[in-house]
Amino acid sequence: MSPLLSARGLTMVYPGSATPALDAVDLDVQPGESVAVMGASGSGKTTLLHLLAGILRPTAGTVTLTTPSGPVGVHALDDAGRSRLRREQLGFVFQQGLLLDELTAVENVAVALMLNGVPRAAATAQAQDWLAALGLAGLEDRRLGALSGGQAQRVAIARAQVTGARLLFADEPTGALDSRTGTEVLDLLLAAVTQGRTLVVVTHDADVAARCDRVVTLRDGHIVADARRTQAVA
């Protein structure tokens, strides 16, 4: 099976630093798998996620995403091209948002569709359906400040999937939540994998990693372990 996402020689050196944050990393992500990326602070795991997702351009190396219309060299796209790719092909769930405080829950989800040209009425209807499916029926018109942390993450999960993105990226999605709410959020992310999506999640939490199909461990910008589980913990 061809990988959905493939990185070769991926290197990132931030301006003013002589030490690579990521150093010649090779990684393949297969369709339909959940991959946890672990490592100590400063190991390069968030940098890796940002490079794979086209948020950053690498200093060296390649990132190739297989799309319905063929492979795309993410590393070679300009800022506008990477922005369009993220908007159309990828979904994101981060610990601290990307949601807009001034918008309601349904508006936060609908805007992802509207940016892709979906008319407001149709976008709103689809957003309402996703929020209801994720247990937020009746809360669609609340702003983020009126939602709990777990509810806000459900809004983020709805927004990540509403465009039909096949590849989801999550950066510490349970880090600011209590254990019960964190488990519920992880359940929803892993349910997306069972529905045909692919998940790459950065986490410090061994319990989160234990439920993924595969755990990639980084140290000092290098992959030091890549363990595939025969069966993820339910």
Image (cartoon, helix red, strand yellow):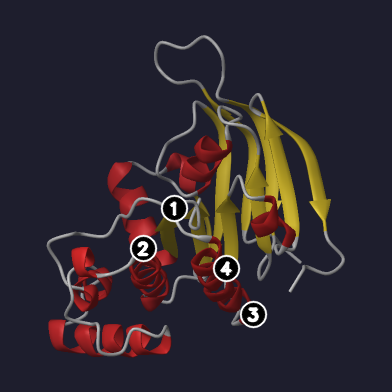
The span from disc 1 to disc 4 (Cα, nearest Å) is 12 Å
Residue holding disc 2: 149
Residue holding disc 4: 183
Taking the spot 56% from the left edge, 67% from the top edge, the residue there is 186
Circle nearer the N terminus (3, 1): 1
The span from disc 3 to disc 1 (Cα, nearest Å) is 25 Å
Q: Indicate the position of residue 131 as horizontal and vertical percent values.
A: 34, 83
Residue holding disc 1: 176
Q: Which of 133/47 is in front?
A: 133
The span from disc 2 to disc 4 (Cα, nearest Å) is 13 Å
Q: In this view, does 134 lie above or below 175?
A: below
Q: In this view, does 176 lie above or below 137?
A: above
Query: Dot 4: what SS?
Result: helix
Circle nearer the N terminus (3, 4): 4
Disc 4 marks a residue whose amino acid type is Thr
Q: Do the residues labelled 2 and 1 touch (CB within 8 Å)?
A: yes
Residue holding disc 3: 194
Q: In this view, does 230 lie to the left or right of 75?
A: right
Query: Dot 2: what SS?
Result: helix
Q: In this view, does 232 lie above or below 29?
A: below
Q: Give the number of callouts.
A: 4
Query: Dot 1: what SS?
Result: loop
Disc 2 marks a residue whose amino acid type is Gly
Pointer 4 local density, CA inside 10 Å: few below 14, some 14–19, many at least 20: some
Disc 1 marks a residue whose amino acid type is Ala
Taking the spot 49% from the left edge, 32% from the top edge, the residue there is 58
Q: Indicate the position of residue 4 as horizontal and vertical percent values.
A: 62, 61
Pointer 3 local density, CA inside 10 Å: few below 14, some 14–19, many at least 20: few
Q: Indicate the position of residue 107 as horizontal and vertical percent values.
A: 18, 74
The span from disc 3 to disc 2 (Cα, nearest Å) is 24 Å
